[in-house]
Amino acid sequence: MKFKYIEEFFVRILMGAALALVFAFVVGIVFTVFHRGWSCISWEMVSSLPGGGFYIGKEGGFLNAIVGSVYIVGASTVLGLVVSIPVVFYLNVFLRSSSKLAYVARLAYDVLFGIPSIVYGAFAFTLMIWLGLRTSLLGGILVTTLLIIPVLIRSMDEIARNFPRDLLDASYSLGATRLETMGVVLRQIMPGIATATLLSVGRAIGDAAGVMFTAGFSDSIPTSLSQPAATLPLSIFFQLSAPQAEVQNRAYAAALVLTGIVLVISLVGRFIMHRFSKNKI
């Protein structure tokens, strides 16, 4: 009996140490980005385009990277949801839980979920060459969509699989069609959809390897899908690669903006999840 108490004591210590370690990493990252970025950031930097010699310490900003990231992440998230939600409904409403097709599909999405983003970028780049396409905003949107679809499907599927099957049977017994039943399911898993969207946005907005091959980089804001587009991760990468300390500090300023965008998206997502959770049955 005494051994069980000792074991529980050590397990609590390990859990507390793990929690403290994760918290220390988060605080360290946020402090470093804020400390080095806050002293350098300015309104001109976030509201103007790069000037001549910006990446060697001269005047300008990274508005092109902010707008490019918003374009790519926003469009890819919408496209990803359009593809992912019907797949999740098909797996959980139209197929039986013991279906071999559902098992194979989930296994495939697990594999796709773990593939590094640079592999998606290399695949998309090869496909673009075969189709005769150049690096562009469209290429960045497509590769980012491919990247986040497995994230959306696996996250929403886990929520939908825990959906009470009795509620489905009750809907069918009342004469509802499968399409009408999908509306019931959608209302119940809406917080899960919001969570999956947050995860996908976090992965999409921080991706640098995929868009490097497909979106390219430009000091101007793209006005069409065929033009190259800059993103914040690539802007940070290029500025950190510079030897000048001033340019490296600008990279931390861009990282601070990126962190702020993710924080705002997270807060909005939590508000949406809380709002829809009130409406659950």
Image (cartoon, grey):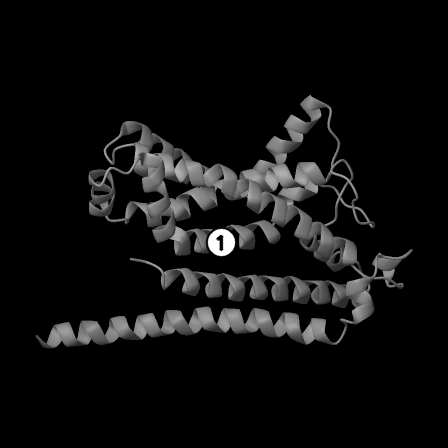
At 58% from the left and 71% from the top, the residue drawn is 30
User: Residue 36 or 108: which is nearer the viewer?
Assistant: 108
At 81% from the left and 61% from the top, the residue drawn is 61
Snapshot quadrant of residue 33: bottom right
Residue beneath label 1, please? 199
Q: Is residue 117 visible?
A: no
* Element type where label 1 sits in the image: helix
Horizontal and vertical percent position of residue 38? 71, 75
> What is the residue that sits farthest to the left in this orientation?
1
Snapshot quadrant of residue 169: top left
Q: Quadrant of the C terminus?
A: bottom left
Snapshot quadrant of residue 59: bottom right
Q: Is residue 276 left or right of residue 202?
A: left
Q: Is residue 148 visible?
A: yes
Q: Is residue 118 above or below residue 197?
A: above
> What is the residue that sits farthest to the front in this orientation?
175
At label 1, the amino acid type is Leu
At 29% from the left and 32% from the top, the residue drawn is 95
Q: Is residue 188 left or right of residue 252?
A: left
Q: Quadrant of the N terminus?
A: bottom left
User: Residue 187 or 34: which is nearer the viewer?
Assistant: 187
Q: Residues within 10 Å of mark 1 (few under 14, many from 20)?
A: some
At 47% from the left and 64% from the top, the residue drawn is 270
Horizontal and vertical percent position of residue 217? 77, 45
User: Residue 177 or 116: which is nearer the viewer?
Assistant: 177
Horizontal and vertical percent position of residue 228? 77, 41
Q: Is residue 126 above or below residue 164?
A: above
Horizontal and vertical percent position of residue 265? 56, 61
